[in-house]
């Protein structure tokens, strides 16, 4: 696996190193040793999937507050998404900045999202499935989020929003301007 540090401190894009032959390819998508060698979380207690029907749908921006903060490893297993993260860690040099990534079923990239980040995505195709490895059990009392369209963050979603849940539309805005990070 190839680990590329994202522009936001502690986030990584992970690409498989496929071994190809006439049948196709084989590649590792997770290895405890490789994650631990980079100081990354390697214990995941949940694996979840989401399925989204319509192109342009936004899911997020979600996170869990301490003591239930979570690391996520996100993969698009069908279709394509624009995945966005926002660093909400006050002590981080990239505090309140955002970065976006294109994850597709063809590029096989994974996004490692550390604790203290808000996360969401927009579907770039119809019929999308996203897979999540999650380091902490879901705790409804710790579930939180921020607005996907908060002008203080300025996420540059690639498409017009075709659908978003009432819950995601009602997250509160942040009150301090952020610096957008390029894709």
Image (tube, rainbow, N blue to C red):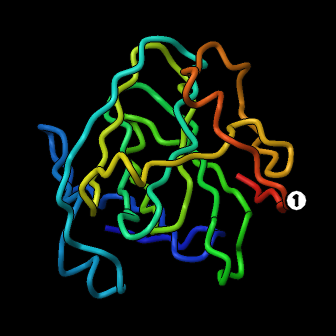
Q: Give the residue at the far front of this rendering.
A: 141
Most foreground residue, 43 or 175: 175
Most foreground residue, 142 or 1: 142
Q: Position of residue 95 (x, y in %)?
A: 71, 72
Bin the neighbour count of mark 1 within 10 Å (Cα to Cα): few under 14, some 14-19, many 20 and up.
Answer: few
Q: Is residue 103 left or right of residue 160?
A: left
Q: Position of residue 174 (x, y in %)?
A: 77, 53
Most foreground residue, 26 or 133: 133
- Quadrant of residue 64 in the image? bottom left
Q: Give the residue at the far left of this rendering.
A: 23
Q: Does residue 56 lie above or below 173 as drawn?
A: above
Which element carries disc 1, helix, strand or loop?
loop
Q: Is residue 114 left or right of residue 56?
A: left
Q: Does residue 63 lie above or below 128 as drawn?
A: below
Judging by the rendered image, the residue that carries numbered circle 1 is: 177
Residue at image position (27%, 61%) is: 136
Residue at image position (19%, 59%) is: 28
Q: Is residue 98 left or right of residue 46?
A: right
């Amino acid at each position: 696996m190839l680990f590329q540090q994202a522009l936001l401190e502690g986030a990584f894009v992970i690409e498989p190193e496929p071994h190809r032959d006439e049948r196709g390819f084989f590649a590792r998508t997770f290895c405890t040793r490789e994650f631990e060698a980079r100081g990354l979380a390697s214990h995941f207690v949940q694996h979840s999937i989401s399925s989204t029907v319509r192109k342009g749908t936004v899911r997020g921006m979600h996170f869990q507050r301490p003591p239930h903060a979570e690391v996520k490893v996100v993969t698009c297993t069908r279709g394509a998404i624009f995945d966005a993260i926002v660093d909400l860690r006050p002590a981080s040099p990239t505090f309140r900045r955002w970065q976006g990534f294109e994850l597709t079923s063809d590029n096989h990239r994974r996004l490692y999202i550390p604790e203290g980040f808000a996360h969401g995505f927009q579907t770039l195709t119809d019929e999308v499935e996203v897979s999540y490895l999650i380091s902490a059990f879901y705790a409804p009392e710790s579930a939180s989020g921020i607005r996907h369209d908060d002008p203080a963050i300025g996420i540059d979603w690639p498409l017009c929003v075709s659908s978003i849940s009432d819950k995601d539309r009602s997250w509160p805005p942040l009150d301090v301007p952020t610096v957008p990070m390029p894709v």
